[in-house]
Image (spheres, rainbow, N blue to C red):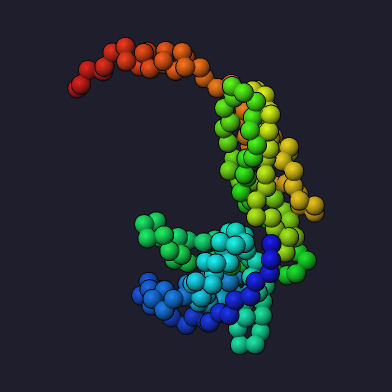
Amino acid sequence: MSEVTLSVEPRTEFGKGAARRTRRAGKIPAVLYGHGSEPRHYALPALEFARVVRENGSNAVITLELEGKSELALTKTIVVHPLKNYIEHVDLLVVIRGEKVTVDIPVVVTGTPGPGTLVTTDLDAIQIEVEALHIPEQVEVSVEGVAAGTQINASDVVLPKGASLVTDPEALVVAVNEAPSESSLEGDEGEAAEAPAEDAE
């Protein structure tokens, strides 16, 4: 993960109206907290921050620059508008170079399993503890050539050097099952069609 720097501005107005004005100005309301400090309210440049997340993932570590001073921060929470798909708000966590943080990392399944199998993903992310400047964008789970009946647990996931697993090691991440046959699917559809309809009350 590459280090990035953003110039930020302090926010002195709060509430929905102030947040809307901030967004209209092309900026994102953000709060920085952690390490026993009082929460600080900033405005992030919207386009630049969106690019950082796109290139570095949702756990991006950013150097915030304000009035000649800089501070390292981890992107902790990103709130996206459910309909219009723009970033409404960001929570940032103060981090110190060299310290470890606990983050959720996306799981990406790669490879082609053995014939006649069906892959299901039970966990789309796992939680790890890792040095703040070495957070991976994702972890990969390979199912290349894997036979039906195989289960891959969190403890089986290969983590980057220096990272440790926080998620329950026994948690199921990916299962490779026998794919249902056409005849069994047709049988299920036939049973559903033959089931008597419930009487309406």
User: Exactly how many numbered labels are in the figure?
Assistant: 0
Identify the residue at horizontal 66%, vertical 84% (top origin).
69
Single out the residue that lies furthest toward the left: 201
Give the vertical position of 146 relative to 69 (above or below): above
Left/right placement of residue 132 relative to residue 117 reads right
Single out the residue that lies furthest toward the right: 161
Identify which residue, 8 or 34, lies in the foreground. 8
Identify which residue, 16 or 161, lies in the foreground. 161
Q: Is residue 92 visible?
A: yes
Q: Is residue 152 visible?
A: no
Left/right placement of residue 199 relative to residue 153 reads left
Assign the N terminus to one quadrant of the image. Answer: bottom right
Give the vertical position of 73 relative to 137 (above or below): below
Identify which residue, 30 or 26, lies in the foreground. 26
Return the x and y of residue 85 as percentages of the image width and height: 41, 60
Left/right placement of residue 196 relative to residue 60 reads left
Identify the residue at horizontal 58%, vertical 31% (top origin).
119
Return the x and y of residue 20 as percentages of the image width and height: 38, 73
Give the vertical position of 196 relative to 88 (above or below): above
Return the x and y of residue 46 as percentages of the image width and height: 49, 72
Identify the residue at horizontal 37%, vertical 60% (top origin).
84
Identify which residue, 74 or 25, lies in the foreground. 25
Single out the residue that lies furthest toward the bottom: 67
Identify the residue at horizontal 52%, vertical 61% (top origin).
78
Quadrant of res 22: bottom left
Assign the C terminus to one quadrant of the image. Answer: top left
Return the x and y of residue 94 as percentages of the image width and height: 65, 70
Quadrant of res 40: bottom right
